Image (tube, rainbow, N blue to C red):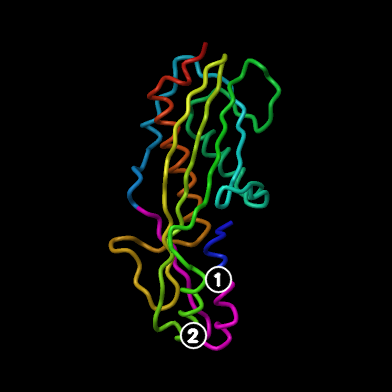
Amino acid sequence: MFRSLRNAGLAVVACMMLSGCLSMKFYVDPALPVVARTDLVAPAKPQSTHVLFEFRTKGSANATATSQLRGQVVSSVAESGLFSSISPATGDESAGQLKIVIDNVPLTDNAAAKGFGTGLTLGLAGSQVTDGYTCEVTYTQAGTTTTTTVKHALHSTIGNHSGPEGLTPMPAQDALNQIIKQMVWNALKDLNAKRAFEGA
């Protein structure tokens, strides 16, 4: 799931035997605006929609992550209140189609080497890795397609390294869930502003 973080983690595994347990802490980047439920105004006549989701790593499809995260993505769409019903598969031809593609692209160069170096120094020279996420959302209904793109980032520290100033560390899964919901809701808010969900 966290491909770049996992690469760094694999490099550290052998070192952990020498250095003991090196803790990893995760921080959600604060740059992307937080969208509240009240910011998402449902159309007068909410439409049904199919939700298609794919997770990619450096542009390549990641089937395992797609399977693991699909539920969170669909749940985030459902919680928005913008649609009358949600379906992960096609069926009703009158329903809209919401396609969500999230691509995980490491923003920190040579993450594995950083993790390895942290292990060799017994955690004293901790390191920080940043993962970038690009979320492209496309909504199609009655022959009309509207697209928007949202970007986010996740910072992680290994060993004795302070996190980004002002940010509170979170468990890995909680951090990823927050990133997904923020990206999806920001994208839905943008599409809503473009009147993409008003129906035919």
Q: Is residue 105 above or below residue 52?
A: below
Indicate the secondary structure of the residue bearing disc 1.
helix
In the rendered view of the protein, which quadrant contains the N terminus?
bottom right
Residue 94: where, in percent of width, then height?
Answer: 63, 15
Give amino acid for label 2. Leu
Q: Position of residue 58 (x, y in %)?
A: 55, 52
Q: Give the range drawn in magenta.
A: 9-29
Q: In this view, does 45 lie above or below 24?
A: above
Of residues 38 and 156, the one drawn nearer to the viewer in this rendering: 156
Q: Where is residue 142 in the image (x, y as percent from the top left)?
A: 57, 14
Name the secondary structure under disc 2: helix
Contact, CB < 8 Å: mark 2 with mark 1? no
Q: Earlier in the sequence, mark 2 or mark 1?
A: 1
Residue 17 is inside the magenta segment? yes
User: What residue is drawn where x is 57% and y is 44%?
Assistant: 72
Residue 9, disc: 1
Q: Residue at x 51, y 86 (%)?
A: 19
85 on left or right of 37: right
| Quadrant assignment, res 12 | bottom right
Where does the image place residue 22, in percent across and percent down from the top left?
49, 78
Residue at image mark 2:
120
| The furthest residue to the bottom | 18
Give the residue displayed 52% in from the left and 21% down from the top: 145
The amino acid at mark 1 is Gly
Identify the residue at image location x=40%, y=60%.
Answer: 27
In this rendered view, identify the residue nearer to me: 110 or 32. Answer: 110
